Structures are given as C-alpha cells and as structure tokens.
Amino acid sequence: APAGHPAVPAPDGAHLIPAYPAAERAVRALAEAVSYARWRREAADPGKVPEYEDIDEKGAAALIEGHLARGQGLTLSTDQTCDLLARYGVHVHRALPAPAPDAAVAAARALGYPVALKATAPHLRHRADLGGVRLDLADEEQLRRAYTELTELFGPPGELRPVVQRMAPRGVDTVVRAVIDPAAGAVLSFGLAGAATQLLGDTAHRLIPVTDREAATLVRAVRTAPLLFGWRGSAPVDTPALEELLLRVSRLVDDHPEVVAVTLEPVVVAPHGLSVLGAAVRLAPPPARDDLGPRTLPAY
C-alpha cells in the first residue's frame, strides 16, 4: 500500500499486485523471479552423468589399492599421477626432468621440438609471470640459451628443478580441481589460471557427481568465462572438450573416494582440443561421512 494509506485486504481468491517504493527494487525482484524460474527448469532436468567406454575403473582401483598399501596418505609421483588419470581418459603432457643442459637437449629430442623449459621449484611453479618459463624453443641453440638464462636468474638447477615439455597449442589457461570438503563431500571446482582470477577468487564449484548440464553451467559460471567464448574478437576455445574433462575428473573422484584431491593446472584449452600440462593427485583412506545433514556448498 502507498505510504500513509492502510492496506486493504484482498477478497478471497484474489491476488494483490506487488508495489515497490523504487524502480530498482522492482527490477531486482523481477530478476530474482526469473532466476528462480530458471532454477526450477534446471531442477526438473538436471542432466545425466555420461558413461565413457574408455574408462578403466577396475584398473584404477587396483592402482589406488597398491599405492595405499604403502602408506595411509600420499601424493602420487608424476608418473603415478599420469598413469592413474590415463585410466579415466585424462592424458597429461609428459614433462621430462632436465637437471643439466645436456639432459634438457636429450629430453627435447625425445619429445620433439618446439618445447618449453619450465622451472618447477615451489616458488616458481605455475608462475609464468616471474619468468620461470621459456616457450616455443625451436632448436638446441635456443634451448641451451634459455637454460643459461634461467640458471643465471634463479640459481642452480638443483633449486630450479627444470623440466622440458613439448609445446601445446595456444589457448586459455584454466584450472580444474576436485577435493573432499568436510561439509559438502566431493566438490569439483573450475576457474581460469592467472593472478587476476586468484585475486578475485573467481572460481565456480559443483557437487560431485557432476552431470553434463552441470558441467556446462560450471564452465559458464565464472566471471571470466567470456574469455572462453571469443571475448573482444579472440578465437572461441573448445568448451565441449573442457566439459568432458570436468566430467571425467568427476567420475574418477566419485568412483574412488580414496582420491581426496586432484589438481590439473594448467589446462590449456585451445580452439580445438585441450592440453593438461600439470597434474597432482593425493590419495588417502576415504573420510568418514555420516550424511546426517544436507549437502551444501561452503562459502569460499
């Protein structure tokens, strides 16, 4: 009712017309109604968890059992991580250690040029902005020069832990994570890689198991999602391949609760296909779940 006027009861069966003191509040209420209607539609058709014929669930279970037999909780080595992820169709680009210039050259010959030279020390890992990465090295001369530059800037190879990796097609760098949250259970997270995204906390989350519809909304839920879809004239990237990767990671964690943490960083999504350039997996006995309360996403 307008200010200063008493509210008039509506007759039985009639509906009152909502009134707002400002247009902004009316627009906000309408937006909430539209959002609620969209949520109702999505709830009616949540999608499905797809099956993949190339998933080797039994083989992955055997690997996990063998690793846990040697310890209650452990972070897998690079080779062990690649082997386990490959059982679910997630293939990580090989990165060969390069403790000396000659070893770097031998690794590049084995992988094929062009290659990237990366320092994997904890303070430099995933920090291309610090200069610990050299890309598009086309031959031995460029590789040796880049190796010298890195060691002069950051110290001896023993501290840098350099590796050589075959170059992947250019695209948008993203991060895919899955963890076991004490309140919500298994949670799949997605965001774009980089300092700006980390500072803004621009990461989206979904509960595992993730359906195909949820994977599509997860990719689009981050504020930086326009970078994946041709922002300012750039080439759109292969989001269907990215959604499939999310679904495969979700299946791995859902099938094997001993996989308590997965990190794929970076995942370079190109106009055609994607490349997983780094991966880490942690195993532990599955945490106790009482499921006495609702599963809700925590506030991040």
Image: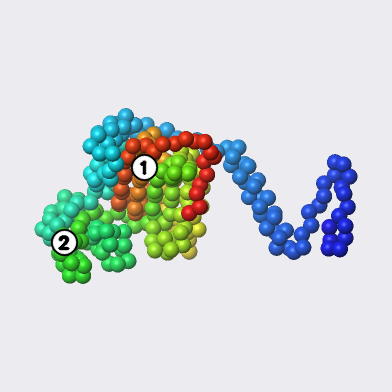
For the residue pair 183 and 265, the one nearer the viewer reads as 183
Give percent across and percent down for residue 14. 85, 44
Q: Up-down: is 98 above or below 245?
A: below
- Residues at marks 2 and 1 touching, judged by CB atoms closer than 8 Å: no
Give percent across and percent down for residue 173. 37, 56
In what element is the residue under mark 2?
helix
Identify the residue under disc 1: 260
Q: How is the image coloured?
A: rainbow
Mark sitting earlier along the chain (2/1): 2
Residue type at mark 2: give it.
Pro
Residue extending furthest toward the top: 58
Residue beneath the point at 27% across and 67% down: 131
| Residue 114 shows in the view | no
Give the CA distance from mark 2 to mark 1. 32 Å
Residue beneath the point at 61% across and 45% down: 39
| Residue 124 shows in the view | yes
Give percent across and percent down for residue 232. 48, 64
Identify the residue under disc 2: 157
- Tell me if 80 is positioned left or right of 34 in this view: left
Q: Up-down: is 44 above or below 230?
A: above
